[in-house]
Image (cartoon, rainbow, N blue to C red):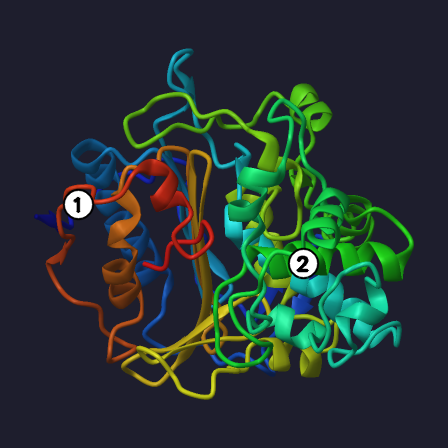
Amino acid sequence: MCFLFFACQNRNGDPLSAPTGSTLQGDGQQVDTSQQLVVPAWFTAASARQLGQELDSIFEQLHRKKGFNGTVLVTKWDQVVYRGAFGYADLKKKDTLSTETVFQLASVSKQFTAMAIMMLKEEGRLDYDDSLHHHLPTLPYRGITIRQLLTHRSGLSNYTYFSDKLWPDRSQYMTNEDVLRLMAAHKPDPYFQPDVRFDYSNTGYALLASVVEQVAGMPFARYLQTRIFTPLKMHNTFTFSPEELEKRSNVATGYTGGRRLRTPDYLDGVLGDKGVYSTVEDLYKWDQALYTQKLVKQQTLEEAFTGTRRKRKRDEDYGFGWRIRELERGDTVVYHAGLWHGYATYMLRNPKEHSALIVLSNVPNGSLRFVKELQEYLHPARPEARPAGSIATASPSPASRSEQEEEQLEGGDPAP
């Protein structure tokens, strides 16, 4: 099926004008970017408007034809060229979505966990090659480093699987401390020895959150709030807790692909691998902050965006909380996807041109399978030209897995 481009009104605001050499950062201040970012002559106010109109056409048809229900924000050269919202936050109440609606980020949360570790490393309070046992001495596993947790090379078994048998009361939320206790008491067999190979691990990032708590001397949720979310003015961003969800009125309800209500369960209390809630607008603030040194030095970020696999698979690699891929035209993009309990999420950044694609959905019905082609459209082989006329998106193939199996593919993280 093809999505034909046609001019139409942007659903939630016109695209901004062409770049002027400065950008609005997370603290609301203008920061000069002209030295590190050269905007090509072909990117004008007119081309930005045209791109916004084309993107609106694409997402409007994805909404009508594929059932896309969610929000989107797209930037080029530090400028928002498109923002849109399609469908409902609550299908029963027919509450219309907006770009200020909050979604569970699923595995996109991992980049915040990695950032917390990087901040502590810069402060000299830990090192990437520290033994995990040094920070979490109750764990019955030796030879695992913080770096191996960051890069999914620990070999540890997935807590979302072994806790299914070991957690006694499904009406009670597990915590990160509970994961530590289960691992200490039952010693689940690791999948392989540390640093043998890459294996996507939710357990690793849950343990990283526990490391943050031990080193920082405060709850992981508070650390993220005080050190990242509040300084960047991400006012609609927080971590999971029943109390927090109860007092928030702008949170999208999660649904299954069949549009059945999907509520949190006992696994949602574990943070680090998932559990951050946010909006496309707040994620734009996060994206822009990564071009500054507000949180960590650029040298530190470069390591986070550097691949770690010894044998590259499908031209893709993994850094610290980010997947890494080289485009046909040579640009290196960093991205992450997420799928968890009724939410499907995707965030891609092209640091070379300061562009981003942010998509949040509360109906994971396969409508996000178009993102690879949309990525190719936004970042064509020739930077100054995009494919003319249409973008093809394959129809979703028949489901071959149960919902639970689909959500736990790669630990709840789809890789479009």
Q: Position of residue 148 (x, y in %)?
A: 63, 75
The reply to whether the C-beta atoms of the residues labelled 1 and 2 are less than 8 Å apart is no
Q: Position of residue 17 (x, y in %)?
A: 44, 57
Q: Is residue 311 left or right of residue 175?
A: left
Residue indicated by mark 2: 113
Q: Position of residue 62 (x, y in %)?
A: 22, 40
Q: Nearer the viewer, residue 5 or 41?
A: 5
For label 2, the SS is: helix
Amino acid type of disc 1?
Answer: Pro
Using the image, determine if residue 399 lies above or below residue 187.
Answer: above
- Which residue is depicted at the point 32% across and 51% down? 52
Amino acid type of disc 2?
Answer: Thr
Residue indicated by mark 1: 396
Q: Is residue 313 left or right of residue 143?
A: left
Q: Position of residue 126 (x, y in %)?
A: 84, 74
**Which mark sits nearer the N-terminus, 1 or 2?**
2
Q: CA distance from mark 1 to mark 2?
A: 32 Å
- Which residue is depicted at the point 73% across and 73% down? 142
Q: Could you classify mark 1 by the number of other residues whose Cα lies within 10 Å: few (under 14), some (14-19), or many (20 or more)?
A: few
Q: Residue furthest right?
A: 217
Residue 125 lies in quadrant: bottom right
For label 1, the SS is: loop
Residue 189 lies in quadrant: bottom right
Q: Residue furthest bottom?
A: 310
What quarter of the picture does the C terminus occupy? Answer: bottom left
Q: Could you classify mark 2 by the number of other residues whose Cα lies within 10 Å: few (under 14), some (14-19), or many (20 or more)?
A: many
Using the image, determine if residue 13 lies above or below residue 120.
Answer: above
Q: Nearer the viewer, residue 363 or 355?
A: 363
